[in-house]
Amino acid sequence: MFVRTTSERDLSAISALLAETWHATYDEIYGSAKVAEITGAWHSVAALEARLALPRSEFLVADDGKTLGGVAFAQADGDGATVMLKQLYIRPAFQGRGIGSMLLDEIIESFFEAKRIRLEVEEKNEKAVAFYLSQGFVAMGRTPHCGADQSGIPALIYERTLT
């Protein structure tokens, strides 16, 4: 796998990757119908396309030349001190191969002036929580609205100081 910047031609494959990963991860937590609703809104090609033009952001994929194994998206705040990791998802068949670490490292390197990186993660997503703890993140609090205003999806907030 190699990590590269996302292009428009990747968006359909990213949308499919996110739907597959979300169903595998969250169907037991939220139910298949709710996951389909979320992925339809948050991970549609149109929603992903809007990210390509966002300022102070990085949108990456892990690619083996045939299949996208993972995706990451992050955006810095106004002064660039805090980076919000908004997505880091690895296709289920590719998990445990170091792809998440590769994507996270590249995100961090893309924001060389940042002082910290922050993320929100569903508390019941034990694999993700364990991954972020192994990457040096610490719990900072909670939010009642993960991913979008008024989502009603509670999550833990994690942060890692960057040097």
Image (cartoon, rainbow, N blue to C red):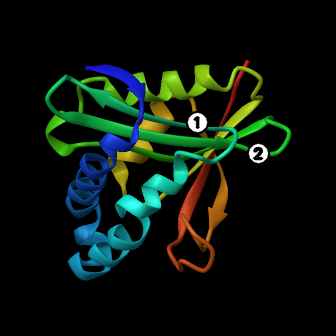
Q: Tag 2: residue type?
A: Asp
Q: Which residue is mark 1?
A: 137
Residue 102 image point, x, y percent: 40, 22
Is 50 located above or below residue 149 in the figure?
Answer: above
Residue at image x 20%, y 23%? 64
Q: Residue at x 19, y 44 (%)?
A: 92
- Residue highlighted by disc 2: 77
Q: Name the residue located 64 percent from the left edge and 43 percent from the top edge.
A: 75
Q: Nearer the viewer, residue 81 or 25?
A: 81
Tell me if 116 is positioned left or right of 68 in this view. Answer: right
Q: Secondary structure at mark 1?
A: loop
Query: Which residue is at the front of the view, 78 or 23?
Result: 78
The image quadrant of residue 35 is: bottom left
- CA distance for labels 1 and 2: 19 Å
From this view, report whether residue 90 is shown above or below residue 22. Answer: above
Query: How far from the left and from the top, in percent, is residue 14?
Result: 30, 48
- Residue 38 or 12: which is nearer the viewer? 12
Task: Return the residue found at the far right.
Answer: 79
Q: Is residue 137 above or below residue 105?
A: below
**Which mark sits nearer the N-terminus, 1 or 2?**
2
Q: If the image is split into quadrants, where does the N terminus sit? A: top left
Residue extending farthest to the front is 9
Please name the amino acid that badge 1 sits on: Phe
Foreground of the two, 141 or 70: 70
- Label 1 crowd (10 A; few <14 / some 14-19 / many >=20): many
Would residue 22 be visible to someone looking at this image?
yes
